[in-house]
Amino acid sequence: MVSVLHIISTIIIIAEFVWGNLSNGLIVLKNCLDWMNIKELSTLDQILILLAISRISLIWETFLMWVKDKLISSITIEELKMIMFSFMLSSHFSLWLATALSTFYLFRIANCSRQIFLYLKWRLKHLIVQMLLGSMIFLIANIIQITVTLEKRFYQYEGNTSVNSIEKEFAILIEMMLFNMTIFSVIPFLLALISFILLIFSLWKHLQRMQLNSREDRDPSTKAHRNALGIMVSFLLLYTMYVLSLLISWIAQKNQSELVHIICMITSLLNPSVHSSILILGNCKLKQSSLCILKHLGCRLKSQNTPTT
């Protein structure tokens, strides 16, 4: 039963791993090619590139954590620390860049006549940069807290490099990391939730003004609102699943529940993998590129399967 569970979960994680790398890789490749051609990128494209890169890193780090059981006997404690800190960095930037994306949608699409909103909208790029720089405070605090605790705990095992000691220290490190990541994910999640609520309010007001117009569904502003809302709804659902998976995984780690830990790892990979696909479908440029690639692959497969005379 255990072996079957591991086989099924491994297949799912590999599928998420491949899908996440393909979808995020497409975002990076398309925007980088545009950058090379036109020599400049919009703020949205810059956020998407950084978000996709951080998610690719997060996907790889999660995958490495999954196979750590097979590597546990051949890696050192320092290498284990490096894997954990890399995972923490990738998760931090993935969450905060996604929050910056939700902020971008809010100020670019929502309609508000308040002076503070118009001022922030005019300085949107500076606002996003300051938000990301401010998030570094939480990242540094997280790293310092974990580093100090690790030094106190791991020096107790100095000179003991057996597999059992490495497994014990690895379990301690995972437990601490999951707890800290859950706590430090609350602030970006609340910011994204506020952006979502304000965008819904803006859409509601816009639809109220358009209710006498029979062509309201064709209104570009209405379509932009709904497109952004669809992306943000999916983002918040996957964001919530990711944060909950961190919390539940921490509890499972404390109680040594392997099944729950496996489920949480599969769930956590949905955020960086699936949401990037939704971003592609919601972006005309990326959607067109993905359709062209699929069409090209379909034509090649068709030509290969056609028998020659």
Image (cartoon, rainbow, N blue to C red):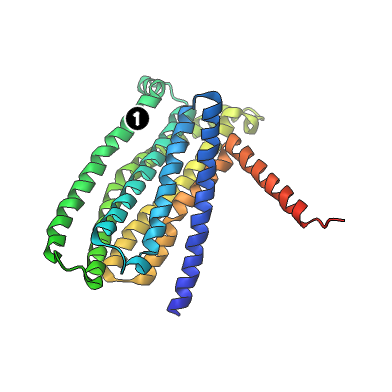
Q: Residue at x 29, y 38 (%)?
A: 135
Foreground of the two, 208 or 120: 120
Foreground of the two, 165 or 247: 165
Q: Residue furthest bottom?
A: 1
Foreground of the two, 124 or 91: 91
Q: Quadrant of residue 267?
A: bottom left
Q: Residue furthest right?
A: 309
- Is residue 304 rendered to the left or right of residue 214? right
Please name the amino acid that badge 1 sits on: Val
Q: Residue at x 26, y 43 (%)?
A: 139
Residue 160: where, in percent of width, then height?
17, 68
Q: Is residue 288 above or below residue 248?
A: above
Residue 172: where, in percent of width, then height?
23, 63
| Residue indicated by mark 1 | 129
Q: Residue at x 52, y 59 (%)?
A: 15
Q: Is residue 300 visible?
A: yes
Residue 86: where, in percent of width, then height?
32, 50
Q: Residue at x 69, y 45 (%)?
A: 296
Q: Is residue 225 visible?
A: no
- Is residue 283 rendered to the left or right of residue 170? right
Circle 1 packing at 10 Å, graded few (<14), some (14-19), many (20+), is few
Q: Is residue 38 above or below residue 163?
A: above
